[in-house]
Amino acid sequence: MDLTPTAWQLWLIAALLLGSLELQLTSFMVLWLAVGALASSVGAALGLGLNGQLYLFTAVSVGLFAASRTLFKSVFMRDAAHLKTGIEAMLGQEAVVVESLGDPRGGTVRINGELWTARSLSGPVPEGELVTVEQVEGLKLWVRRPTASLPVPSGDPRKE
């Protein structure tokens, strides 16, 4: 009775060991090696020579590793929303006027806890009013009053 393992059995053992190692690690690096070893095991069982087995192992492992970002992105992140950062995240957000926005020189607004120089696209805006960021130009924000906000008339309404 011959107990010498054949090539396909050795590749299968390698695939099982690499697969169990993948369960212990947090990355998907070893998974692709396990799949490559499994493919080489099938190739060896079908009579592929040693050079062909090594080529198959390398091709499958490297191919899956190269395609893994695309695979995971298309399978696991197909419904994920695009994360806006920087200037893209500021557009459309509301800011509070800290220093009134006058026509000649603009003023200051607070957005996301930061103070920014701002200019108004909708005329003068008093301190404390909410505005919407329409455009970012360098370190200057161009803002506009929201359409729902109306100026508060000055004077006492009870006198009428």
Image (spheres, grey):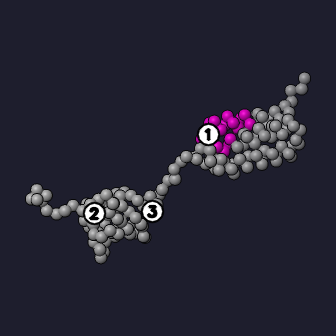
Residue type, mark 2 in image? Val
Residue type, mark 3 in image? Ile
Circle 2 packing at 10 Å, graded few (<14), some (14-19), many (20+), is some
* Predominant SS of the magenta segment: helix
Q: On the image, numbered disc 3 is attached to which residue?
A: 87
Please give left or right for residue 36 compared with residue 104 in the image: right
In the image, the segment drawn in magenta is 15-31
Q: On the image, numbered disc 1 is attached to which residue?
A: 25
Residue toward you, 88 or 39: 88
The answer to whether mark 2 and mark 3 are in CB contact below 8 A is: no
Please give left or right for residue 40 compared with residue 127 in the image: right
Q: Nearer the viewer, mark 1 or mark 2?
A: 2
- Residue at the front extreme, as displayed: 160
Q: On the image, numbered disc 2 is attached to which residue?
A: 98
Pinpoint residue 99: horizontal percent, then vertical percent: 27, 66
Pinpoint residue 80: horizontal percent, then vertical percent: 53, 48
Residue at left offset 24%, top offset 62% = 151
